[in-house]
Amino acid sequence: MNHPSIAVRCTGVTKSFPAGDGMVEVLHGIDFDVPAGELTMLVGPSGCGKTTLISIIAGILTPTSGEVEICGSPILRRIGMEAHLGKLPNQLSGGQQQRVAIARALVHAPRLIVCDEPTAALDADAGQTVLEILKDAALAPDRAVIVVTHDTRIYSFADRIAAMEDGRIRTVRSAPFAPLSEAA
């Protein structure tokens, strides 16, 4: 079923992994829509299922049950790495390497861009540059960007924040966001 304003639709998504003699369910019936033309962040404590969910959305993992629909499209170019053409990766800073990775992901104008902790190893300025690039990419009405993060400094770039806990989406909030102390 095609939903033109929805880039990603998760319906009843579960994921279990083998553990000892049985299985452990990591995701518990996730129902989650990601609107096209927005930057959505998945946030929550370590081990709550963010990376598992984004891996399913990206097609790296297969859900145990449930469905994931992907629709969406085009791209912008604002990487700012022209002065570093011809350099090897080990000749670039961490922030420059992140921008190259994003450029490689964006070059084919994907409809969906998923990033797991894109600012984890970056200073504030490099992190802001990376999020500006991702935010610009998300502005296309037929594209969506999903960012998994623990970095509260970048929440202001989000159009919507989905807070996860114990393998479930607990809240989905749209901008503007309440102060961090009131956040889910």
Image (tube, helix red, strand yellow):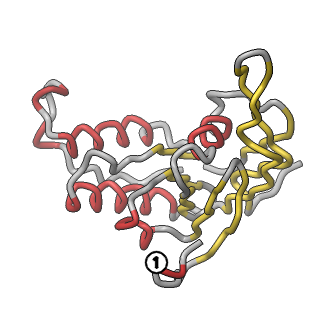
Q: Which residue shows up at 20% across the image and 61% down it?
A: 125
Q: Nearer the viewer, residue 135 or 127?
A: 127
Q: Which residue shows up at 78% across the image and 25% down it?
A: 23
Q: Position of residue 79 (x, y in %)?
A: 28, 49
Is 111 drawn above or below residue 175 in the view shown? above
Q: Position of residue 106 (x, y in %)?
A: 44, 42
Of all residues shown, which one is farthest toward the top? 21
Q: Position of residue 62 (x, y in %)?
A: 73, 28
Is 184 drawn above or below residue 15 in the view shown? below
Q: Position of residue 36 (x, y in %)?
A: 65, 60
Amino acid tagged 1:
Leu
Is 115 drawn above or below residue 41 in the view shown? above
Q: Which residue shows up at 62% across the image and 63% down it?
A: 162
Q: Quadrant of the C terminus?
A: bottom right
Q: Is residue 6 left or right of residue 149?
A: right
SS class, disc 1: helix
Residue 111 visible somewhere in the drawing: no
Q: Is residue 23 left or right of residue 174?
A: right
Answer with the quarter of the image where residue 64 lies: top right
Residue 52 visible somewhere in the drawing: yes
Q: Which residue is mark 1?
A: 180
Q: Which residue shows up at 67% across the image and 28% down it?
A: 61
